[in-house]
Amino acid sequence: MNDNSQNRRNTKQRQTVLDTVMEHCDHPTAEEIYLDVRKKDSKISKGTVYRNLNILSGNGDVNQVKVQGADRFDKTTCNHYHIICTKCKKVFDAPIEYAEQNDSIVEDKTGFIITKHQTMFEGICPKCQKEKE
């Protein structure tokens, strides 16, 4: 197999991984993405999916949300905040505007050049609250 066909195959696999992330609104884990990709391509390996997720997040095509337990992947790439349910561990977008002015405040106080910041809110989602009752 020559290098061109190898690159083409990887590009197709990467596109399949990207398409799968784009189908989700629930910030899936790499494992969840892998399971969904396998339904489309039964020959794709877990390593290939994980490697392509790293490439896609490194390129800015998807957003990697670092949370305890397992990183999540988000199709929304603009700067925004997240909420994690401490009960079911699901991750949601927080419905508040990204506060860019915080980047400047931290730059002024530290001398760092801030490119972005991440904020993770924690709580119990409405579904888990209902299950408690």
Image (cartoon, rainbow, N blue to C red):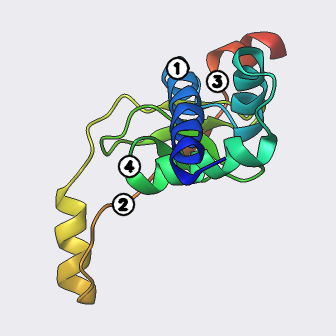
Indicate the secondary structure of the residue bearing disc 1.
Answer: loop
Q: Are marks 1 and 4 in contact (CB under 8 Å)?
A: no
**Labels in figure, total:** 4
Q: Which residue is identified by label 2?
A: 117
Quarter holding residue 101: bottom left
> Which mark is in front, 1 or 3?
1
Mark 4 Cα-neighbour bin, 10 Å: few <14, some 14–19, many ≥20: some
Q: Nearer the viewer, residue 80 or 85?
A: 80
The amino acid sitting under disc 4 is Gly
* Residue that appears at 27% across and 72% down: 114
* Residue that appears at 41% across and 42% down: 81
The amino acid sitting under disc 1 is Cys
Mark 3 Cα-neighbour bin, 10 Å: few <14, some 14–19, many ≥20: some
Q: Which residue is identified by label 3?
A: 125
> Which mark is in front, 2 or 4?
4
Mark 2 Cα-neighbour bin, 10 Å: few <14, some 14–19, many ≥20: some
Indicate the secondary structure of the residue bearing disc 4.
Answer: loop
Residue 62 locus on image (x, y percent): 45, 41
Q: How much space separates mark 3 and mark 4, taking CA atoms?
A: 28 Å
Name which of mark 2 and mark 3 comes first in the sequence. 2
Residue 59 locus on image (x, y percent): 40, 53
Q: Which residue is identified by label 4?
A: 60
Q: Which residue is identified by label 1?
A: 25
Q: Nearer the viewer, residue 44 or 37?
A: 44
**Quarter of the image where the C terminus is located:** top right
